[in-house]
Structure formats: C-alpha cells, structure tokens
C-alpha cells in the first residue's frame, strides 16, 4: 500500500529530513507533539508493529536511539518518548510502521499522563498466564 511516507522516501513530497540510510529515513513530524518531534520510518512500507520484519524493527530502534541522543545534544531536552502506534485503537493514522521520537522538557505537558487502571482479585495472574502461553506458542512457531 502506498503511503504519504513512501512518497517522502521517493522524494515526491518534501520533508525536513534529519537522517537517511539504505533502510530508514527520519524526518520532522509535520504536526509535532513537541518541537523537534521526529518520525523514524522504514523505507519498506510494513503496515504496523505486528507485520514489520524483526531485523528491520531492530535497526529502526537503534536509529531511534541515535535520534534521541541527537535531540538531547541539539535541543537540550531532558527526556524522550519513544512510541509506535499500532492499529487504529492505538491512534495509528498512517499505516506504514514508524517510531515517534519526541523530545521532552520538564513540565512541558506535551503528552497526557497515561490512564492507570487496576486488576480485580486474581485477574493479573489469569492475564499473565494467557500472555505467557501465547508468547510460548509464538516462539515455538518461530514468530
Ligand atoms: P500515527 O498516528 O502514529 O500514524 O502518526 C502519523 C504521524 O505522521 C502524525 O503525527 C502526523 O502529524 C505525521 N504526518 C502526517 N503527514 C506527514 C508529512 N507529510 N510529513 C511529516 N509528518 C507527517
């Protein structure tokens, strides 16, 4: 599927590029959560976290770490949010997997604090068992 990010990769629409290699491009988000907010995008357009090639995901994470270090150096930010929205329920708008690297400053309130919920008695144990089983199944299937 062609996305706006693929158009940026091909140079068909402009972007403020901060990094480029054979597999990855990183550029400023056009509607930043904070000034200096960077998107780290694989050149190959996997739709989301579940689909992206594992080695490419690892490379993307390393590039995101370098971008975060660059934000500290260039913008003197005090922290970073590294986010990948996967699926509409998680707020994904562009179905071309990407990391958001968001520089944060003390007290900037750039992101809402996350919701904190609670488990009923015994519920955490049940959920952990079902997740452990699913992880075991995925690993034994080589996923
Ligand atoms: P997501 O909701 O995780 O899919 O994030 C998509 C992000 O892409 C949003 O933060 C948008 O502001 C950003 N975006 C959309 N179009 C462009 C563009 N042409 N250049 C840079 N960022 C863009």
Image (tube, helix red, strand yellow):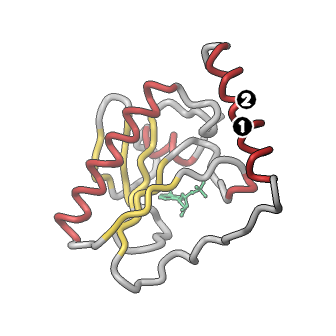
The quadrant in which the C terminus is found is top right
Residue at 39% across / 41% down in the picture? 61
* Tag 2 residue: 134
The quadrant in which the N terminus is found is top right
The percent coordinates of residue 19 (x first, y second) are 28, 46
Residue at 41% across / 47% down in the picture? 40
Residue 65 versus residue 138: which sits nearer the camera? 138
- Above or below 16: residue 128: above
Residue at 45% across / 36% down in the picture? 42
Q: Quadrant of ligand 1?
A: bottom right
The percent coordinates of residue 48 (x first, y second) are 62, 39
Asked if marks 2 and 1 touch (Cβ < 8 Å), the reply is yes
How many residues crowd mark 1 within 10 Å: few (<14), some (14–19), many (20+)?
A: few
Q: How many marks?
A: 2
Residue 112 horizontal side relative to residue 105, left or right:
right
Residue 143 versus residue 5: which sits nearer the camera? 143
Q: CA distance from mark 2 to mark 1?
A: 5 Å
Element at label 2: helix
What numbered label is drawn on residue 131? 1
Q: Quadrant of residue 22?
A: top left
The percent coordinates of residue 75 (x first, y second) are 23, 71
- Above or below 30: residue 53: above
How many residues crowd mark 2 within 10 Å: few (<14), some (14–19), many (20+)?
A: few
Element at label 1: helix
Residue found farthest to the front: 121
The percent coordinates of residue 115 (x first, y second) are 67, 72
Residue 137 horizontal side relative to residue 81, left or right:
right
What numbered label is drawn on residue 111? none
Residue found farthest to the top: 141
Q: Quadrant of residue 108?
A: bottom left
Q: Quadrant of residue 24?
A: top left
């Amino acid at each position: 599927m062609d996305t706006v990010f693929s158009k940026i990769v091909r140079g068909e629409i402009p972007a403020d590029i901060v990094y480029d290699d054979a597999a990855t491009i990183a550029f400023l988000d056009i509607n930043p959560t904070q000034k200096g907010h960077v998107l780290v995008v694989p050149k190959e357009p996997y739709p989301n976290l579940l689909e992206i090639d594992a080695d490419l995901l690892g490379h993307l994470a390393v590039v995101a770490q370098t971008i975060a270090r660059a934000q500290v150096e260039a913008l003197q930010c005090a922290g970073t949010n590294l986010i990948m929205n996967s699926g509409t329920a998680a707020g994904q708008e562009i179905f071309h997997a990407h990391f958001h690297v968001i520089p944060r400053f003390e007290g900037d309130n750039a992101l809402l604090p996350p919701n904190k919920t609670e488990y009923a008695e015994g519920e955490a144990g049940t959920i952990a068992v079902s997740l452990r089983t699913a992880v075991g199944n995925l690993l034994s299937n080589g996923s």
